[in-house]
Amino acid sequence: MSNTKGLRAFHNARLKKQQREAYDLGEARKRAIALHQAGRIAEVQAVCREILQHAPRHFDALHLLGVTEYQSGRYEEAHRLMEQALLIEPRSAGACSNDGVVLHELKRYQPALARYDRALALKPDYAEAYSNRAMTLTELERFAEAVASCDKAIALKPDYPEAHSNRGNALCQLRRFDEAVASCDQAIALRPGYADALSNRGNALIELGRFDEALTSYDRALALKPNLAAAWVGRGNVFLNLNRYGEAFAAFQQALAIKPDSLKALAQLAHYYERHGRMEEAIACYDRVLAVKPNFPEVISNKIFALDLVP
């Protein structure tokens, strides 16, 4: 009986080996990459899953599948796949950096930063990792470090529009608004249809009191990328400053329809409610922000002010 089982196991293993050899993994990998470059995400995923049926520890298939899950907005699954890929190839700077991007979207900023730092330890001239790192440092309110990280990215790759745009965003947080506009303008010069840079530019222009220019910048961004929640928030901020409250409310609601966890949209919607004496609704918005970011001094202060005004 034991010999029969042994023979069966031997034949099964041999059959699986023959199947693997019949399936050209290299050709399938090339096909997946070509499909990804063509933006055919569903087909990329099908090929990657096919590869993994034949080779469950195929690093490139796991990594690329993780990238496409991120592009599809399925961040937890993307992170799971990236982690699997990194168990197989822990010295992949690209996978480390990409996992950092996914963790950033999951608002796990410290682990994201650790991933970028690992990527840069493996590949010190990795401009993309420096630029992505700057976005996470900005969320952690380490704005000067974010600017420095962008400067390193730009030194390595001067024509890198994302780094110029991220630099503009960090400079805006440092209240260096003219420099922020200049950085965003550089990003737009390098990529004229760059919606995120146009939105970041609008944020700086609001702070400079140049509301008409800011609104034009947001409108250009939204014409290019209608689902850019940050631009809807910015547009709402312009309307708040111009006392066009109905349009402000509509813009914030649109931002939240696109990105329900947008802390900026929730905070600005709370301002709208405050101006209309709707304190309980303002407090509810502040509570949603503080549930994600408990140590948010401005929101804590605003909530206390709103609580004092509740009848």
Image: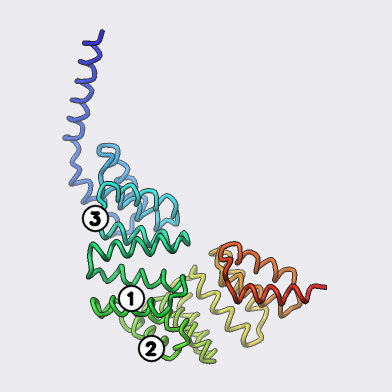
Q: Position of residue 206 (x, y in %)?
A: 53, 87
Q: Quadrant of the N terminus?
A: top left
Name the residue at the top extreme. Answer: 1
Specify the quadrant of the image occupied by residue 144: bottom left
Q: Quadrant of the C terminus?
A: bottom right
Residue 149 marker = 1
Q: Nearer the viewer, residue 3 or 276?
A: 3
| Label located before the other in sequence (3 or 2) | 3
Q: In the visual, does 206 lie left or right of 311?
A: left
Labelled pair 1, 2 in contact (Cβ < 8 Å): no
Q: Secondary structure at mark 3?
A: loop
Q: Position of residue 257 (x, y in %)?
A: 58, 64
Q: Amino acid at mark 3?
A: Arg
Q: Nearer the viewer, mark 3 or mark 2?
A: 3
Specify the quadrant of the image occupied by residue 169: bottom left
Name the residue carrying label 3.
91
Residue placed at 44% from the left, 52% from the top? 76
Between the residue at mark 1 and the residue at mark 2, the CA separation in whole angstroms equals: 17 Å
Q: Secondary structure at mark 2?
A: helix
Q: In the visual, does 255 lie left or right of 99?
A: right
